Image (tube, rainbow, N blue to C red):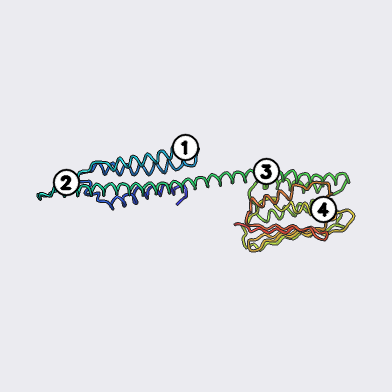
Amino acid sequence: MNNKYLPLGIDLFFCLILLPAMITLLPVERWLENNSTFVVLLVGWLYTVYFLTRKACVPMLFRSRRQLIIALCLLVGTVLVTWLVTQYQMEFPFRGDHPRSERIRRVTNLSKIRLHQQGTWFLYLVTICFSIAVGLLTELYRQMSERQSVEFEKKKAELALYKAQINPHFLFNTLNTLYGLMLAQSEKAEAAFVQFIHLVKYMYTRATQDKVSIAEEAQYIEQYIELQKNRLDESRTQVDYTYENDHACPNAQIAPMLLITFVENALKYGTSAHEKSLIRIRLQVKDNTLCFIVENPIVNPRPADKAPGIGIANCRKRLELLYPSAHKLNIQEQDGWYKVELEIKLSV
């Protein structure tokens, strides 16, 4: 049963099954012979108590202080009305010709009156306790749903912000590469512009989506690397990029432009015009698990007085939002090498 219909199902269970079953425990048939008005009054009052408590009193307990007082007054009021119901003068016919019959009749009536009063209080207590319990569970579920909804909208807004921050970061780095080629009047400039167009097309057609195929993201990374190679001296800098996929889950997808940040950093800080370097980038998908490893020597370190960029921070936050318990990110900087290891459990 859908959770939103659960309270309705509980109401129907109480009204159609539980309360009628409890009423049959009392001598209702004998009451109906001469006190049908009382029986109708009692049953109607019990249903009133149930819905008044569940729909009005319990929700008001979690509102303002004024509504809390009103709810408590209503609950006290139900107790008073129930007491008035128990004072109903019921008629119990008695047949007997013995001289002591009048005394026996009075004793019998008194015991029957006590029975009907005890039965009324029993039904009231069961009804009020059940309605309070159902009301509390319903209110708890409502508050949890509202809290989850607020948290979802918050994460959705945060994720949209992180995506919006990715595009300028990517454009700045890539345009900087093209600008360098133009200044050097490189023959690679024209080919680089064509590659740039393909990358921008991917960025605006895929980056706004929630998920893309692994193959598309792998191809995007490869195109980005090829574009960046235009500014590199290949005699000094070597970029080794490999992509492997066992295709055990061909429909596996990943958030777009999630891995490119680590590639950007490797090509930014792992390349130099004066030192040789080897950058290793490995993307592997096996048994529905994505493993992404980036290694680069730190030959072009960030100046100490320069604040860290937003790329890695955004990537961490996106991972926390998109894969809260399905990823492992380990970043190490040791012996002049920078290594990123990312593992994501993919959902099909």
Q: Which residue is mark 3?
A: 161
Outermost residue to the top: 66
For the C terminus, the image quarter is: bottom right
Q: Which residue is mark 2?
A: 93
For residue 107, side relative to residue 281 (left or right): left
Q: Secondary structure at mark 3?
A: helix
> Separation of disc 1 and disc 2 at Cα?
47 Å
Residue 239 visible in the current orientation: no
Which callout, 3 or 2, points to the residue nearer the camera?
Answer: 2
Residue 67: which numbered mark, if any?
A: 1
Percent position of residue 244, x then y: 70, 62
The amino acid on which the numbered mark 2 sits, given as a three-letter code, is Pro
Disc 3 residue type (three-letter):
Leu
Q: Amino acid at mark 1?
A: Gln
In the shown orientation, is residue 335 left or right of residue 113? right
**Location of residue 112 in the rendering, given as x and y in whole percent from the top left corner:** 23, 49
Separation of residues labelled 2 and 4 (CA atoms) = 101 Å
What residue sits 44% from the left and 46% below the top? 135
Q: CA distance from mark 3 to mark 4?
A: 26 Å
Name the residue beneath numbered marker 4.
Answer: 269
- Asked whether 163 or 78 is in front, the reply is 78
Rendered view: 326 above or below 154:
below
Label 2 sits on a secondary structure element that is loop
